[in-house]
Amino acid sequence: MGILSTFDRIVWGISVIVTFVVLFIVGGGWLLSWYPDPIDARAALIAQYFNLVYIAGMFVSALFVGTFFYFIFKFWDREQPAGLD
Amino acid sequence: MDTLEKLEWATIIGGTVLLFGLGALALPVLDALDNPDYYGEPDYVVKVEAGQWYWKFIYPDGSESGELKIKNGDIVRLELESPDVIHSFYVREMGFKVDIIPGKTRIHVISAETPGEYWIQCAEFCGAYHGGMTTKLVIEE
Ligand SMILES: [Cu+2]
């Protein structure tokens, strides 16, 4: 992690948090994934499992995008011109 | 081991644990859904006929209705059949869909615990009036 500055770490951290929140909303969200209340124990069991998969999926997505940003900062050489100047 | 290698291993091990963990946790749920003996001995059998575009429920005494009426707490064995195309029996509040394939009898056991009226919808596109292929599940006290 030596190559990352404090600024990089803050940006990286915020990116992960923002991505997490965005995926939470875009990926269905509690509002869009609204589902009527279960009316029996089995339905409750199924709903519980779906929620679990949903939350696990959010973590994996956040991790995935977080890794993407990690690589960008890791190999981003700011000594080089950006190519736009 | 450098950071990238650690990250790689964390991804491999984390992903494996997550997948197998979720897989293992899914087993009791799948059993609850698909095992016809999950609730034990059913109280009675209701035959369900799903066709273009209607629902027909045939009770043990031979009577028929367009709405499924059962008593709260009854363990009901549904035997679902279709004379034409594939339909799907869907009650959102019960968290399952059962595809009804022509020529086969699908078995699904239900047991409601909350009296009320709920939607039954066809959840498999079955033609022009698929969207209108709804009826009610009435769970009486
Ligand atoms: Cu249908």
Image (spheres, coloured by chain):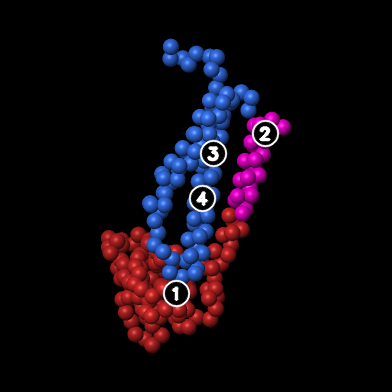
Chain colours: A blue, B red
Pointer 1 chain: B
CA–CA distance between discs 1 and 2?
52 Å
Pointer 3 chain: A
Under mark 3, the amino acid is: Phe
Q: Which residue has dot 2 on it? A: B5
CA–CA distance between discs 2 and 3?
16 Å
Please tell me how crowded label 2 is: few (under 14), some (14-19), or many (20+) other residues with Cα within 10 Å. few
Residue appearing at x 50%, y 68% in the figure: A42
Q: Secondary structure at mark 4?
A: helix
* Farthest bottom residue in view: B61
| Mark 1 or mark 2, earlier in chain | 2
* Residue B85 visible (yes or no): no
Determine which of the numbered discs, if any, sits on residue A55 in the image: 4
CA–CA distance between discs 1 and 3?
41 Å
Please tell me how crowded label 3 is: few (under 14), some (14-19), or many (20+) other residues with Cα within 10 Å. some
Q: Which residue has dot 3 on it? A: A64
Q: Which residues are magenta?
A: B1-21
Determine whether label 1 and label 4 are within 8 Å by CB: no
CA–CA distance between discs 4 and 3?
14 Å
Left-right relation of B65 to B98? left
Labels 1, 3: front one: 1
